[in-house]
Image (spheres, rainbow, N blue to C red):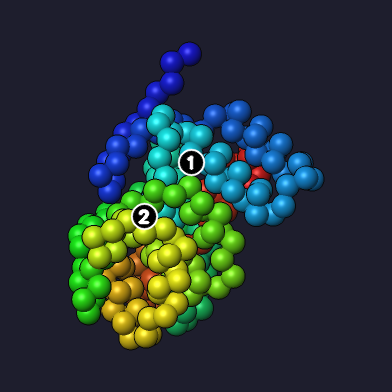
Amino acid sequence: MEIEYNTVNISGLEIQFRKWKVKDKTLLDQIDLDTSLSPLEKSLKKRQVFVYNCLKNPVLLDIEQYNYVLSLIREFSLHSDLEFSLECEKCKHQFLRTFKTPEIVQFKDSDYKEVDIRGMKIKFGNIQDSNYDRDILNSISSSERYLLDLVYHIEELNGKKVSVEEALDLFQELDVDVFQELFDAFCDQRASCSFSKTLTCPECGQELHFEFENISSFFPKSWNV
Ligand SMILES: [Zn+2]
């Protein structure tokens, strides 16, 4: 049977993705049942199933690009709405809403260019090192994750390629204000993806902004994820 692919272009990458298949659920079950796997290994393998196994050509994605492609695969695979039980922060009114996947996905593509932070020239780019996912998932705090995420995006430092370890060693020594400047420049350039929606409370008219995580109706019902 021929596989049908959709295509999206992000961050200069052409990504062709298929729908989720029944065999993907079988793989998820095998991962869940495999007692030899650590929780980290399980998470990494599940990330493969949800996105990477669905791609025609292998590509490395950062967490933001990954979430965006995940949302596209979800939309391609399933036509069911996403369901949310919401509460107004002002009047505490509770209400239900349903959305199509694209209605809650806010995506900004990357725009990499060289930055000069106090004489340090840095060129950011897409992830090239396949240890990225493991390091990000293994990070012990959000500040460590931010640092790793930034370092993995460095393509060149002062005109030279650097390893993740070298960049980490160097950045540990930076003054915090310099690092903050660098981090802000990186955030301006990198891709970003959030699942969020601004709504008006049907009861009191308050404008409400919701950020969605762990969306229960995101995966197929039969997958029980
Ligand atoms: Zn309200």
From the viewer's perspective, tell me whether residue 37 is left or right of residue 1: right
Kindly identify which numbered label has been placed on residue 138: none
Asked if ligand 1 lies within 8 A of label 2, the reply is no
Q: Nearer the viewer, residue 197 or 98?
A: 197
Image vertical order of residue 107 relative to residue 54, above or below = below
The residue located at (33%, 51%) in the rendering is 126
Q: Amino acid at mark 2?
A: Val
**Label 2 SS:** strand
Instruction: Say which label, 1 or 2, has the lower sequence index.
Output: 1
State the residue position of label 1.
51
Report how many numbered discs are placed on residues in the image. Answer: 2
Classed neighbour count for the residue bearing mark 2: other residues with Cα under 10 Å, few (<14), some (14–19), many (≥20): some
How far apart are labels 1 and 2 at the CA level? 16 Å
Visible in this render: residue 5? yes
Residue 146 percent location from the top left of the image: 44, 69
Residue 79 percent location from the top left of the image: 44, 38
Q: Nearer the viewer, residue 184 or 108?
A: 184
From the viewer's perspective, tell me whether residue 65 is left or right of residue 144: left
Residue 188 percent location from the top left of the image: 26, 67
Visible in this render: residue 124? no
State the residue position of label 2.
105
Image vertical order of residue 156 relative to residue 75, above or below = below
